[in-house]
Image (tube, rainbow, N blue to C red):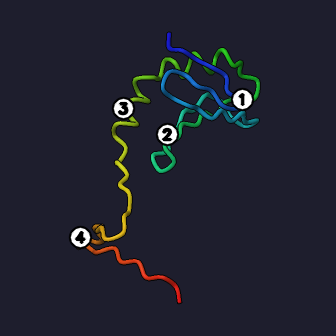
Amino acid sequence: MPARALISDNILQIGDFTIEVKPMARARRLTLRYSAKKSRFTISAPKRTSRKSIVAFVTAQQEWMRRQVSAAPKTLPVLEQGSVMIEGLLRAIIHQSAP
């Protein structure tokens, strides 16, 4: 079983992953989501779900979580004098200071 820690009421650390827990009154089941844009996992859970059940569910989903992280597009830093691809064309990054 992976190492786990409760960081706060709504944040869990399980293995290499930090998961935001969102208790929801209308939720009917546990739903785990990954936002590649934010590089963050969120689990929605019915309000009365025990912390133990949430940890067990997330622990069982570790392999899926690893696949989501590895399948996410890699981010590249935007650097002065660099270039980016826009609509199939390579464009130079040029910074101009405001007057």
The residue closer to the viewer here, 98 or 45, is 98
Between marks 1 and 3 in the image, the one whose residue lies nearer the viewer: 1
Q: Is residue 92 left or right of residue 45?
A: left
Q: Are marks 1 and 3 in contact (CB under 8 Å)?
A: no
Residue in view at x 28 percent, y 72 percent: 87
Residue topped by disc 2 = 34
Q: Are marks 4 and 1 in contact (CB under 8 Å)?
A: no
The residue closer to the viewer here, 31 or 1, is 1
The residue closer to the viewer here, 1 or 58, is 1
CA distance separating discs 2 and 3: 11 Å
Please tell me which of labels 2 and 1 falls first in the chain: 1
Please tell me which of labels 2 and 3 falls first in the chain: 2
Q: Quadrant of residue 90?
A: bottom left
Please tell me which of labels 3 and 4 falls first in the chain: 3
Q: Position of residue 83 (x, y in %)?
A: 28, 68
Dot 2: element: strand
Q: Quadrant of residue 91?
A: bottom left
**Label ID, residue 90:** none
Q: Residue flagged by tag 3: what amino acid is it? A: Arg
Residue topped by disc 3 = 67
> Mark 3 Cα within 10 Å, few/some/many (few <14, many 20+)?
few
